Image: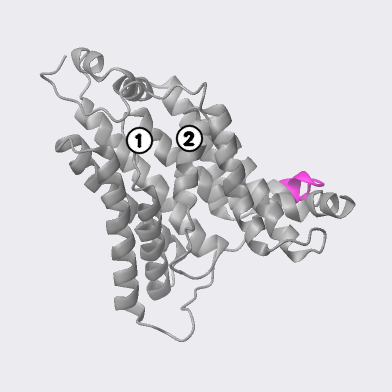
Amino acid sequence: MSEILSQIFQVGFFAAVIRIATPLVFGTLGELFAERAGILNLGIEGIMMLAAMTGFSTAFFTGSLWLGVLAAVLAGVVAGLVMGLLTVSLGLSQHVSGIGLTLLCSGLSFFFYRLIFGQPSTLPAIKPFETVALPWLAEIPVIGPIFFNQFALVYLAMGIVPAAAFVLFRTPWGLNLRTVGENPHAAYSAGVSVTAMRYQALLLSGALMGLAGAFLCMAQYNAYTFGVISGRGWVCIALIVFGQWNPWKSAAGAILFACIDALQLRLQASSAINLPYQVFLMLPFVLTIVGMALVSRNALAPAALLKPFHKEAR
């Protein structure tokens, strides 16, 4: 037990937790905006994968990491637009459309990666983002190295959480979005374009998912592999339920998952517990399922989630 505690109470451990949580925060907030508008975007896993491949390829050939991030965001926006065409304009099943989009985006990422790079004996790699130490703040004992000596995208994630909460709960646009997700007919009667709001939510959702994919390939790792997402998109959907469709609670859930993930990585490298490494790998996902099962009993999803909007229906 003492060895396990020694693995946890280290500055490096908590700094790693923040980094591991970053793509989950981006993806979770992206999914949150979509679901708040009444759209369950099950395409998140594929969108993150396609964005990661697009961003990595752009950075590899241009040498610019920020161009790679922009390309990843644009890939996510395009995927969000496709999801909008299927679910908002055509009114198709959100479950089927989302899973189909995940399969499509995953297939496209595999196809274009093979088309661009072939089957190299060694993985193509880039020079990833480097940590940026904020003056003065990074020198604060304990807190400084954890929060203020991180990647630029980590700082962006830190700012997006309060920004998302402010936009959702303190702006007219956020009020319209939540109304569309709860009662689209009331929103339409009040002069709000349900179609436009849902499209805007899906485009924003795709952009944030693109940031998640970009972070994984250009900050956390320096290469693209077919398993780079590793189910993080599905975890984000679970974190929405865990956080009860609230940005702050969902971000807290992402940090909790990251904490467990970072712990299992450290335990694999130690001799504190003699178990197969597969047990450690599945630990964060098992605890996520347990946590979601416990919280979901009292979770109230947006009333119009999964329901297509038809003007003539009342």
Residue 143 spot, x, y in % from top left: 76, 44
Observer-nearest of 280 and 38: 280
- Residue 140 colored magenta? yes
Residue 64 spot, x, y in % from top left: 44, 67
Observer-nearest of 263 and 251: 263
SS label for mark 2: helix
Magenta segment, which residues? 136-145
Res. 240 mark: 2
Residue 101 spot, x, y in % from top left: 28, 51
Q: Amino acid at mark 1?
A: Ala
Quick one: which residue is furthest to the left in this view? Answer: 312
User: How far apart are labels 1 and 2 at the CA level?
Assistant: 11 Å
Task: Name the side, left or right, on which 71 lies relative to 197.
Answer: right
Name the front one of labels 1 and 2. Answer: 2
- Residue 184 colored magenta? no
Q: Residues within 10 Å of mark 2 (few under 14, many from 20)?
A: many
Task: Name the side, left or right, on which 154 lies relative to 206.
Answer: right
Residue at 61% in and 48% down: 284
Q: How many marks?
A: 2
Where 161 falls versus 310 (above or below)? below
Residue at 73% in and 61% down: 275
Quarter of the image that includes the C terminus: top left
SS label for mark 1: helix
Q: Which residue is mark 1?
A: 34
Task: Name the side, left or right, on which 236 lies relative to 189.
Answer: right
Q: Amino acid at mark 2?
A: Ile
Where 197 falls versus 94 (above or below)? above
**Label 1 vs 2, first from the N-terminus:** 1
Residue 159 spot, x, y in % from top left: 54, 39
* Res. 32 visible in picture: yes
